[in-house]
Structures are given as structure tokens and as C-alpha cells.
Image: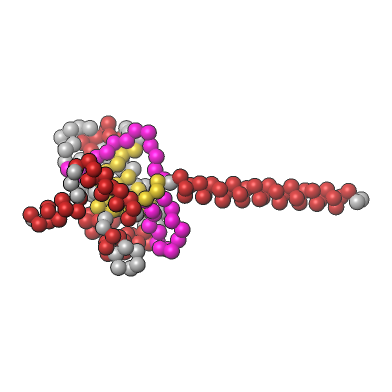
């Protein structure tokens, strides 16, 4: 009889150890997912105080489709859709242009200036393209998260309305890094180029 309580004790300890291992595995996986995501891109959550989640996006071969109209009349739609992922710029439409630009969208990189269009056409973008990840970038004044960033506020509203969407913003450091790359590659300051274009218009 004294062996039964000892067996129960060992069984309880074994079950406890298994539960701890499972819990540890889950915790480590979630932390690993956060650490291994693409730094510089943080998900917009309906609850703005939630823990940051980084963009987890990987693919072997991808097609990058600009919004300039260069692929119109190309007939490359099927070739674009055959790639592991399709990255589109801004809010250029696919509907009606599938023969040239394809139908799939894995990720859209969207300027803050195009967010009002996302809001106006939200049924299309967050309904038809519900599985698409969106990366929004823009200047700090529009992307600030203290309630005064117009663009960020619109993104939070969309994240609340379409809770299954994957909307990410580029962090200040990532935007600065991209500005530096642009300047190193072109020899021009993006801010100066932008202000010059606005001045010309």
C-alpha cells in the first residue's frame, strides 16, 4: 500500500513536468516569432496598447508589381501569379487587369498618401484581399501613435473594423534607414525631392 501514494506522486510530477515543457515550448515559440519577424514593421492592433508583433513574411521567389502601369498590355498576369508571393505598390487595382498584372496579392506597400483610398475602398482591400498583408509608411507627424497621427488613427479604425487584417507600419528607424538608402543610391535627399515635386505642382 505505501507504493500507491509514491506512484501517484511520481505520476503527478511527470504530468507537471510535461505541462511545464509544453508551456515553455509555447512561450519560446511566441518569443521566437516576435524576434525572428522583420524588424522595423510593427502590426497595428485594434488595442493599441498590445504587445508589438513584427511582420513575418518570407518567400522564395516574388514578383514586385509597381503602380506605374508599366505592365499594362504585357499579358504577364499568370506569370506574376505563379510566384511564391506577389508584392504590390500602393493601391493600384488588379480587378479588370488580371491578364496583365495578375490576381494575387501577398503584400502591399502603401504610402501614407494612399491610405484615404484604402479607407474609401475598404470593402475591396479588406474583403476581397483579406489575406493580404499591408505595410504602411509615412512621415512621423502622420504616423504618430499618441492620437494625433491622422494616418495611424485611420489604420487603427480599419484594424478594429477588420480584425483579421494584417496591417503593419514602418517604424521611424525603418523609414530613416530607407531615406538613407535612397540618398546613397540616388545622391538625392528624399525630403528635398518630395518638397521640390510639391513646389513644382
Q: Position of residue 75 (x, y in %)?
A: 20, 32
Front in this rendered view, residue 143 or 9: 143
Q: Residue lying furthest bottom in this view?
A: 147
Q: Residue at x 39, y 43 (%)?
A: 57
Does residue 78 lie above or below 160 as drawn?
above
Judged left or right of residue 21, residue 176 is left
Q: Position of residue 163 (x, y in %)?
A: 40, 57
Q: Residue at x 24, y 35 (%)?
A: 77
Q: Position of residue 53 (x, y in %)?
A: 43, 53
Q: Residue lying furthest right in this view?
A: 1
Which residues fall within the magenta stretch? Answer: 41-68
Check residue 56 for magenta coloring. yes
Front in this rendered view, residue 53 or 100: 53
Front in this rendered view, residue 44 or 199: 199
- Count of all numbered marks drawn on residues in the image: 0
Judged left or right of residue 9, residue 193 is left
Check residue 50 for magenta coloring. yes
Does residue 127 lie above or below 48 as drawn?
above
Q: Is residue 121 visible?
A: no
Q: Is residue 172 visible?
A: yes
Judged left or right of residue 199, residue 103 is right
Q: Residue lying furthest left in this view?
A: 200
Name the chief secondary structure element in magenta.
loop
The quadrant in which the C terminus is found is bottom left
Q: Position of residue 61 (x, y in %)?
A: 34, 33
Judged left or right of residue 5, residue 75 is left
Q: Residue at x 47, y 49 (%)?
A: 34
Amino acid at each position: 500500500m505505501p507504493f500507491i501514494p509514491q506512484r501517484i506522486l511520481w505520476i503527478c510530477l511527470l504530468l507537471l513536468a510535461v505541462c511545464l515543457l509544453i508551456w515553455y515550448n509555447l512561450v519560446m515559440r511566441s518569443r521566437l516569432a516576435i524576434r525572428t519577424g522583420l524588424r522595423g514593421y510593427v502590426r497595428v492592433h485594434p488595442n493599441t496598447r498590445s504587445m508589438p508583433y513584427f511582420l513575418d513574411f518570407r518567400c522564395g521567389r516574388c514578383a514586385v508589381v509597381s503602380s506605374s502601369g508599366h505592365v499594362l498590355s504585357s499579358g504577364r498576369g499568370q506569370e506574376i501569379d505563379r510566384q511564391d508571393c506577389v508584392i504590390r505598390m500602393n493601391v493600384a487595382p488588379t480587378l479588370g487587369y488580371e491578364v496583365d498584372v495578375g490576381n494575387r496579392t501577398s503584400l502591399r506597400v502603401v504610402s501614407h498618401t494612399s491610405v484615404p483610398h484604402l479607407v474609401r475602398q475598404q470593402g475591396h482591400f479588406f474583403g476581397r484581399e483579406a489575406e493580404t498583408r499591408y505595410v504602411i509608411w509615412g512621415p512621423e507627424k502622420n504616423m504618430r501613435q499618441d492620437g494625433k497621427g491622422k494616418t495611424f488613427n485611420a489604420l487603427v479604425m480599419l484594424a478594429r473594423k477588420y480584425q483579421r487584417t494584417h496591417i503593419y507600419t514602418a517604424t521611424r528607424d525603418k523609414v530613416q534607414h530607407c531615406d538613407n538608402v535612397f540618398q546613397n543610391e540616388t545622391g538625392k535627399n528624399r525630403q528635398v525631392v518630395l518638397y521640390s515635386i510639391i513646389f513644382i505642382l
